[in-house]
Image: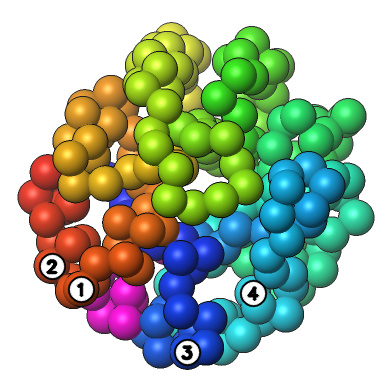
Amino acid sequence: MKLIAPSILSADFSKLGDEIRSVENAGADWIHVDVMDGHFVPNITMGPIIVKAARGVTSLPLDVHLMIANPDSFISDFAKAGATLISVQVEACGHLNRTIQAIKESDCRAGVVLNPSTPLSSIEWVLEDVDFVLIMSVNPGFSGQAFIPNALSKVRALRTMIQERELSILIEIDGGVNENNIEAISKAGVDAFVAGSAIFGSQNYKKTIDSFRKKIGK
Ligand code: DX5
Ligand code: ZN
């Protein structure tokens, strides 16, 4: 099953509730929430109060992507605020297995995120424990960046790893996804597609999401 996750980082924050309702009505599957702390990445965005506000206006799963140092300290805050899925950057975790267990104990689905330069081997020993893997196809920090093409080879290699171990883990991609590249990304083996500027920067969210769906199938 293919899932589309608009990133609200590119939404108009002066009317965030309306923006979330609009993408839900346009056919979004998840709402992607980019949390940045100014330490792990050179930008500051939103925290648990935004997740709580989002939870109040949509019943869609909230996909909370933590681009923060020391994520362990904040997992329960995001879970209590209403996160459905929580992913952590492997580069920010000294004890990744423990962090994954903490996400699961908070009743959220657990994901691990790899920066473009981080090898798949970094998750070799936690793959059995996660619900999804997010492959970054830009360096995290900002929306509107260009897709890094070698993310496709990484997705293919990850798909092979998952198949060889007979696991049912979702592969998510994040960064620079648009109407021109989404078909190739899907063919490489991606299940969930984050898109910020390509959706919120478009005139008609439904038209954009419909055209994504035509290219990726069900
Ligand atoms: C980047 C964030 C992304 C970003 C995607 O650090 O993790 O989720 O919002 O934005 P686009 O789709 O515009 O690259
Ligand atoms: Zn993200």
Q: CA distance from mark 3 to mark 2?
A: 21 Å
Residue underneath mark 4:
51
Counting from the top left corner in percent of width and height, residue 180 is at: 18, 40
Q: Quadrant of the N terminus?
A: top left
Q: Which residue is mark 3?
A: 15
**Tag 1 secondary structure:** loop
| Mark 2 surroundings: few (<14), some (14-19) or many (≥20) residues within 10 A | some
The answer, for residue 117, to whether it is visible in the render is yes
Foreground mark, 1 or 4, reads 1
Q: Quadrant of residue 201?
A: bottom left
* Residue on which the image places disc 1: 203
Q: Which mark is residue 52?
A: none
**Residue nearer the viewer, 6 or 41:** 41
For badge 1, the amino acid type reads Gln
Q: Which residue is mark 2?
A: 207
Of the two numbered discs 1 and 2 in the rendering, the one whose residue sits closer to the viewer: 1
29 falls in the magenta region: yes
Of helix, strand and loop, which one carries label 4?
helix
